[in-house]
């Protein structure tokens, strides 16, 4: 999804009266490496859309996800 599409989506949600939005930054590779997660986009997304931005984390370990406001973990715990 492009930033323009995401902007349209957030505007549509807000236009329906919902201001309780949390966006999740996600890297589509699984498992993801810390090098390709690009978590530096999280502050930019927070400023651009004026809402909380969390992390949908596909990395191994916890190093990337430390400090996330909202976190969706996808792990194989076996």
Image (spheres, grey):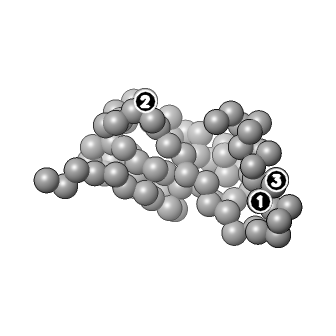
Badge 1 marks a residue whose secondary structure is helix
- Give the residue drawn at x 67%, y 43%: 44
Q: Nearer the viewer, residue 16 or 45?
A: 16
Q: Position of residue 49 (x, y in %)?
A: 74, 51
Tag of residue 43: none
Badge 2 marks a residue whose secondary structure is helix
Query: Looking at the image, is mark 2 or mark 1 earlier in the sequence?
Result: 1
Residue 53 sits in which quadrant? bottom right
Residue bearing the label numbered 3: 11
Closest to the camera, between mark 2 and mark 3, is 3
Q: Position of residue 8 (x, y in %)?
A: 79, 45
Q: Give me the C-alpha separation between circle 3 and circle 1.
A: 5 Å
- Give the residue drawn at x 75%, y 49%: 9
Q: Give me the C-alpha separation between circle 2 and circle 1.
A: 29 Å
Q: Nearer the viewer, residue 68 or 19?
A: 19
Residue bearing the label numbered 1: 13
Q: Give me the C-alpha separation between circle 2 and circle 3.
A: 28 Å
Please state if 32 lies on the left or on the right of 47 as rendered: left
Mark 3–mark 1 contact, CB under 8 Å? yes
- Give the residue drawn at x 50%, y 43%: 26
Residue bearing the label numbered 2: 36
Please state if 70 lies on the left or on the right of 62 as rendered: right
Q: Position of residue 72 (x, y in %)?
A: 43, 57
Mark 2–mark 1 contact, CB under 8 Å? no
Q: Position of residue 39 (x, y in %)?
A: 50, 41
In this view, 13 is above or below 40 = below
Badge 3 marks a residue whose secondary structure is helix
């Amino acid at each position: 999804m492009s930033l323009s599409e995401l902007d349209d989506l957030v505007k549509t949600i807000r236009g329906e009266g919902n201001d309780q939005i949390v966006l999740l930054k996600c890297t589509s590779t699984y498992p993801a490496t810390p090098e390709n997660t690009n978590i530096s986009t999280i502050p930019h997304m927070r400023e651009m859309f004026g809402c909380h931005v969390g992390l949908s984390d596909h990395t191994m370990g916890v190093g990337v996800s430390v400090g996330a406001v909202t976190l969706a973990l996808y792990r194989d715990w076996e």
